Image: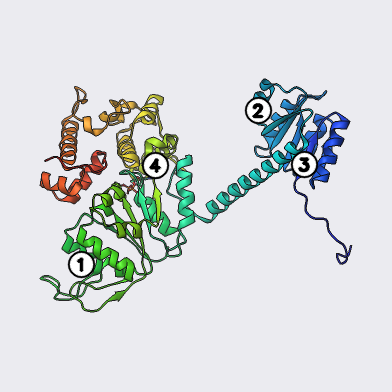
Amino acid sequence: MPENGHQSAPPPRGRILVIDDEADIRESLETLLDLEGYSVQSAENAAEGLKRFESGIYDLVLLDLMMPDRSGLEVLDQIRTRDKHTPVFLITAFGSVEVAVEALKSGANDYFSKPWDNEKLIIEIDRQISSSRLEHENRELRRALKQRYAFPNIVGKSERMLRVLDLVAQVAPSKSNILITGETGTGKELIAKAIHANSPRAEQPFVGVNSGSLPPDLLESTLFGHVKGAFTGAVANRKGYFEIANHGTIFFDEIGNLTADMQVKLLRVLQEREFMPVGSTETVKVDVRLLAATNADLLKMVEEGRFRQDLYYRLNVINIPLPALRERKEDIPSLVDHFFQIYCQENDKFLNPQGRHMLQFEPEALHILMDYSWPGNVRELENAIERAVVLATDEIVPLSVLPEHILHSTGVRTRSSAGDALPPDASLFEIVAEYEAKVITDALESAGYSQTDAAARLRIPLSTLNQKIKRLGIQIRKRTEPRP
Ligand SMILES: Nc1ncnc2c1ncn2[C@@H]1O[C@H](COP(=O)(O)OP(=O)(O)OP(=O)(O)O)[C@@H](O)[C@H]1O
Ligand SMILES: [Mg+2]
């Protein structure tokens, strides 16, 4: 049929299926909905209604609760096993609270009793259809993003982790600076790498800097490079990390450990997009995306004058907060599986011919892993699993391969009470580790949780302190006033 001259009807406001055995109810609904611009189909019994539902696409179903061949709740049940999302309104002759509660529990979106108020019904239908369309769009968007972005080595299906991954997918393509925050071992570096890998800079370098591990002078020449003769030992020109990362991404780990002087220098590069190598008089221009991570409360540090506010705002254009492992415990079984696979491969143990691991924890062990508070988060779990794989002698992994402190935890104990809870048969290694953790925790407490000050008190390099904090799973609190 030629399209010219043929006026097509405007698209309907929504497609509605009416399932009701009473002819006059069907007719009055059809008339009302048609007048309001919906396209309506109706069925006079449950069987026909289900058949129509399966063969058509509807935005909403109006379903009678009492029909001779089947109850509305049964029909609702069958609709829900096929389709979780299409909204269903129940219509009933009896306006009782029990029926309403039952209907909503069974997955109906709303319920109306006869005789209903036409105006109210239309308002609710409209509201429901637009909100489910929005939900549908969100689901589709999420699916499309997931397909376009790949996070092959990130495990996490919890709502919290899905939100993180959605955010990563959203911000990866941009050039914005991003601040990744979270407790130690929550995966900040992993997320930084995922942002880079899913950005247009993926083919360019990703350069990581540990902001606190080098003395300030050395950090400056490491970041900005130096020219020959700039200082004793500078025998040739050397490129710094910013130049190496040109067109790529630079990742500042533990950004809270930058000295005041380095904060100024970093701010300058971010503002000017250029810098001067140590000892040089010429500026170098770079195009670098900056990602930063911290387990400290930077905003608090800003309030206390320890971190520059202007730098904070430059870094924190977008914040990605990572949940602690204890806030997403439902991810623990798949993380265990993930690390079993990695460490079985690494140790060439317990692999089937297809290369899949064959390990499984005994149920009690898994319960303990789920109950434990994981102060060292995913890294601590990873270490525990690595140890378990090494110690395991059988495919069913026993409780006894778990570290003592996890076995004896109540799920709330943290390192601050370390030393009080050692089992009588603890090994020398465990006693030393507990004692070391206690000394370090005390030093951190005395230093108001400034890692730099604590390292000075313990007379060890800051980098050594950092490693020990990670290895021992010591919880870093927010900074407080140091004890005299
Ligand atoms: N969601 C995850 N899926 C799989 N592995 C993870 C996940 N999160 C963290 N890991 C692993 O846990 C370990 C610690 O992660 P990462 O180094 O990224 O943590 P972090 O937050 O940077 O820690 P820190 O604050 O101590 O530097 C790494 O081996 C990382 O691969
Ligand atoms: Mg890290």
Precedes in sequence: disc 1 or disc 3: 3
The amino acid on which the numbered mark 1 sits, given as a three-letter code, is: Ser
* Label 1, label 3: how far apart the Cα atoms are: 69 Å
Residue 118's image quarter? top right
Residue at label 4?
A: 323
Residue at label 1?
A: 221
Q: Is mark 1 within 8 Å of ligand 2?
A: no
Q: Position of residue 385 (x, y in %)?
A: 34, 37
User: Against 231, is 303 above or below?
Assistant: above
* Label 4, label 2: how far apart the Cα atoms are: 33 Å
* Label 1, label 4: how far apart the Cα atoms are: 35 Å
Q: Is mark 2 within 8 Å of ligand 1?
A: no
Whether residue 484 is visible here, answered yes or no, is yes
The amino acid on which the numbered mark 2 sits, given as a three-letter code, is: Ser
Residue at label 2?
A: 106
Which residue sits furthest bottom?
282
